[in-house]
Amino acid sequence: MTDLNRRHFLAAGAAATAGAMLSGPAQAAAPKDPMPAKWDETYDVVVIGSGFAGLAAAIEAKAAGSTVAVLEKMPTYGGNSIINGGILSVPGNAPQKALGVKDSPQLLAEDIIREGQGLNYPEKVKLMAREAYPTWEWTVKTLGVEYMDKVGQEGGHSVPRFLYTKNGSGSAVVQKEVDYLAKQGVKVRTRCYVETIIRDADGRVKGLKVRDGYRFPKADSGKVKYIKASKAVVLCYGGFGADVKFRTKYDPKLTAKFDTTNQPGATSELWRETARIGCTQIQQDWIQCGPWNSPEEKGMGIALYFAQGAAATRGLWVDCATGKRFVNELANRKVRADAVINLNNEGHKCIALADTSATDAWKVARPGMLEKELTAGVVHKADTLEDVAKMNNIPLAALKKSVDDYNKALAAKSGDEMGRTFFPKAQPMAKGPWYFSYLSPKVHHCMGGLQTDIQGRVIGIVDDQPIPGLYAAGESTGGVHGAVRLGSCATLDCLVNGRIAGKAAAAEKAWG
Amino acid sequence: MTDLNRRHFLAAGAAATAGAMLSGPAQAAAPKDPMPAKWDETYDVVVIGSGFAGLAAAIEAKAAGSTVAVLEKMPTYGGNSIINGGILSVPGNAPQKALGVKDSPQLLAEDIIREGQGLNYPEKVKLMAREAYPTWEWTVKTLGVEYMDKVGQEGGHSVPRFLYTKNGSGSAVVQKEVDYLAKQGVKVRTRCYVETIIRDADGRVKGLKVRDGYRFPKADSGKVKYIKASKAVVLCYGGFGADVKFRTKYDPKLTAKFDTTNQPGATSELWRETARIGCTQIQQDWIQCGPWNSPEEKGMGIALYFAQGAAATRGLWVDCATGKRFVNELANRKVRADAVINLNNEGHKCIALADTSATDAWKVARPGMLEKELTAGVVHKADTLEDVAKMNNIPLAALKKSVDDYNKALAAKSGDEMGRTFFPKAQPMAKGPWYFSYLSPKVHHCMGGLQTDIQGRVIGIVDDQPIPGLYAAGESTGGVHGAVRLGSCATLDCLVNGRIAGKAAAAEKAWG
C-alpha cells in the first residue's frame, strides 16, 4: 500500500465512522473543524488584532457588558495603526469652516465612490461618511485624543478635510484606546497568534486555537491554547502589504523590489485561514502604494509628511529628467503612485518640491517635522531653485517654467495645468531656501478583504449568508474603499466599523 | 437543549469520534469531505465544462490514453464558447502578412500585459502568445476548423491580428472539438451538474458528487451519483457573468440593470465550491462588459459585429447628444465600455456609425451579416449623414465635423484625435447609405478566477501548493488576462491552457 493510499484509506475510514455520505449544501458549507476536548479560556467576544479597529471593537463590546479578549500576534500592540500618520477625514470640522471650506458627509461619500471606481458598497460608504463627525467627537470626548486645530488635504478629496493628531501619528489614537481599555480591565494580549478559527459543523465560529507566547514569525512557537468565544470573534487583523508572496498572487507587479510602509506583521496567515473556513474575500488585487514615500529611508518613514503636506499641497512634484510636473499632486494615491512608478521604471528620478512659503505654512501644522526630516537626510535643502536643478540634474529652464506656470495660474486663479485645486491661502513659490524629497512608492494598504454586511457580519462564500459568530472591520475587510482608498479614510473606516462590529458582537446570543 | 446547542453537541460528538484534536496546518488545509461508500463510475480524468477549454482538455487527455468524461450542467454543450464570435489572436498569420502588418508573439504579449495593467502572470502570457500560432494550426490540421482568409482588429491590440471562423462563431470550433471527441468515443454528458468536489483529508481531490439528469437551475433535480477521478479533475466551468448576486459581490456596479452576453448557465455554483475546498481565486472583481452590444436585442446578439468590424475599425463611435466622438474606438474593452456607460448614465445615446465604404470592406469579411442585422432591426440604415443626425437628434454640424476630422486625419496620415490607429486600407467616410447601431455595454467576461501554475494545476489558498488532482483552464481561471481581456484572446487562452491542463492531468499518477 502506498503512503498516499494508506492516508486515503485512514481518512476514508475516519470519515465513515463520523457519518460518511453526509450530503447537501448545509454540511458542505461548514468546514467542520475539530472541536477541542476542553477550552482553556472563555470570553464573550474575542477580538483579533490591536489596531484602530480591533481596539474600537473591544471598547464597544466591553461597554456593552461583554467579557473581551484582544489578541495580537506581534510583541507590541497597534499594528499599522500605531505607525500611521494620524489623519482623520471629518467633513464639517471647525478648521474647514475657518478657511471657508464647504463640506458634507455626502461630498465625502461622493469622493470615495468616484475615486473607488464604484467598486465600493455604497451603503457602507454612506454610513462611514455620516459617522465621521460623531466618531471624531467620540475620540475627543470619550478617549481624549488631541488634534491640531488645522485642516489638511489628501489626494482624491475635493476639499481639504482631514484633521490630525497633535503628535502627528496614529499612535495618539491607539494609545488612548489602549489606555481606555486598560481602565475597563482589558489588556491587549501580545504574542498571541491565532492558528485556527474553529468553525463547527453547524456553521458557527466557536473559538480559536492560538499560540500563546508566539515569536513572530516562528510557526511552531508558543503554547497551544483553545479560546472559546461565546458570542463572537471579531476579525481586525489588518492587511498583507508586507507579505510579498501573498500580495504577488493578486498583483504580480508588487514584487520584493517594492518596499512597504507596513509593519512586518502585515502578513497573510489569517487571510488564508478565513478563506479556508469559507469567508468571502473580495477585491484583494487592489493594493495601494503610497505615492509620497522616499527611497532614502526604510518603511513608512517621515519624508511623506513633507511630500504631501508641503509639496503636494502647496508645491510641485517634478520629473527630474524633464523638469516638468507629471501628475496632479492631489490626485488619488493610485494615480500618483502609478505615475511615479512609470517614471521610476524609465530611470527618471522624481522629487517633491516646496519653497519656504510652503514649508512655513506647513510647519505650523506639523511643528518640528521639517527639522527632523532634514536631520534624517530624507528632505534636502537648496538655497535657490538653480541649486535644486543642479543637485538633481534637472533642466533648469524647464524647472523654472514649471514653477512660473504654477505661480501664474495661482495668481490668475485660472485652472492648474494638472487639474489640481489650489490649497486655500496658498502662496506663489518664490521664497528660498527650497526643499525637496525623492519619491518612490511603497506598498501601503490593502483595499480588498472580507465581505461584511452593514453590521460587520462576515459573509460566507457558499451561500452569501453571514457566518454565525464572526465579525470583521478595518483593513481585513473589503468593499468600503473600492479601488482606491483615500488618505485619512483608513482611520475613519477602522474606528466606525470597529465600533459597529464590537457592538453587534456583544449583542449576539451566546452559543453555549 | 436548544436546536443550535443540539446540533453543536451532535457535531462535536461526531468530530470527537473521528479523532478530535487533530491539529496543524496539513489537517487544517484540507476540507475532509466525506468519501462515498462506493463510486458509481470511474474515469482517469473528469472534465467539468464543455466550452473551448474543457473540450480541448478532454481531447488531449484522451489522446494521452486516459479514460475521460466531460460533464456539462446545461442541456446543451458549448457554454459561452458556442455563442462567441469565433475570433482567435494569431500573430504572424498569412492575412496579416498580405496587408504588410508586422506582428510577433512578443508584441501580442506586450499588448496583453499593457492593457492588463500588469495584473497578468507574465509567464502565462508569454506561453499563451508563443502557443498562438501552433494552436491555430492544431485547430486547422487536427480538428478541421475553417477560417476566413481575412484579419480583423479588436480593441487594445496594437495591430490587426485576429483570424475568425468561416461561420463567424465559436460554434465552428466547439463543433469540431465535439466531433473529434465523439470519434474517440467520448461524448459530452449534458445535464450533469457537479454539486461537490470531493477533497479528501490527504488534500487530494478524489472525485465528484454529481446530479445526473439535472434540470438547470433546480438544485435538487437529477439523480445523485459519485464519480471517481483516478488521475484528476479538470475545471473548465467558465465565468459567472449571468449571476447578478455573485458578480455584485465583487463589482457592486454590475447590478441587474446590466444585461449579459453570457448563456444563462454562466453562474457561480462552482466558484463557490472551489473556494470552499480551498482553491485560491484571484482578481474576481475584474468583470468585463462588452462595449459593442446593442440594447435593441437580448444577450450577445449580432449588432456587435457591425459595431466592431465596420464602425470601430473603419468608422466612428458618436455621442448623440454632442455629435462628437468620445473614445478611441480601438481602445480596450474596459476603456470603451466605461466611456459608453458614463454617457448612458448621463442619458446620452451612443451610436456606432459606418458609411458604405466601411461596410463594403467589412462585408467581405462577414458575408451576409449586415443583411441579417438589418432584418433583425439592430443595425439601422440612413441614406445620408443628415438622416443619421435627424433619426438620432444629433447636432448635424458637430457630426459632420467629426466625420470630416477623421477623413482629414486619415488622408494626411496624421494622428487620429482619439489616438486610434488607422485600419490598413481604410477609406474616408463619405459613401451613402450610412449605417448605425446603438451601444449599451453588457456583462461579458470574468478576467479573474482560479490561480493556476504554468501546467494548469490549481493553487491552494492555505499553503500556495498545487492541490493534488485538480487542474483548471479558461474563464474559470485568473491571472492570464489581468485587468482587461483583449478581444480574440479568450479562445486562445481556452485552447492553449485547456490542452496543457488535459495533457498534465493525463500524466498524473492514479491515486487508487
Image (cartoon, coloured by chain):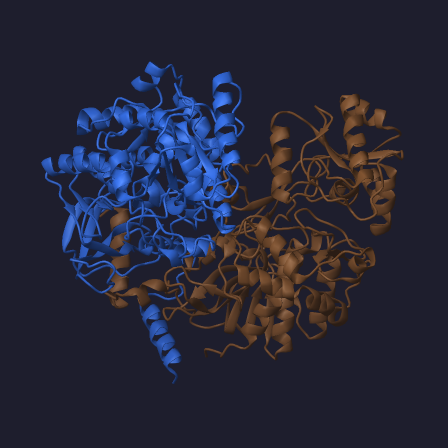
Chain colours: A blue, B brown
Q: Name the outermost residue toward the bottom.
A: A1
Total residue callouts? 0
Residue B268: x and y in percent read 52, 50
The image quadrant of residue A40 is bottom left
Comparing B104 with A295, the one in front is: A295
Q: Is residue A312 left or right of residue B326?
A: left
Residue A376: x and y in percent read 26, 43
Residue A295: x and y in percent read 37, 48
The image quadrant of residue A372 is top left
Q: Is residue A499 visible?
A: no
Q: Is residue B328 visible?
A: yes
Comparing B393 with A206, the one in front is: B393
Q: Is residue A157 left or right of residue B233?
A: left
Residue at the (16%, 38%) spot, across then down: A178
The image quadrant of residue B384 is top right
Residue at the (14%, 34%) spot, across then down: A180
Q: Is residue A11 left or right of residue A324?
A: left
Residue at the (36%, 81%) spot, across then down: A3
Comparing A26 with B504, the one in front is: B504
Q: Is residue A197 above or below residue A328?
A: below
Q: Is residue B193 left or right of residue A295?
A: right
Residue A102: x and y in percent read 40, 16
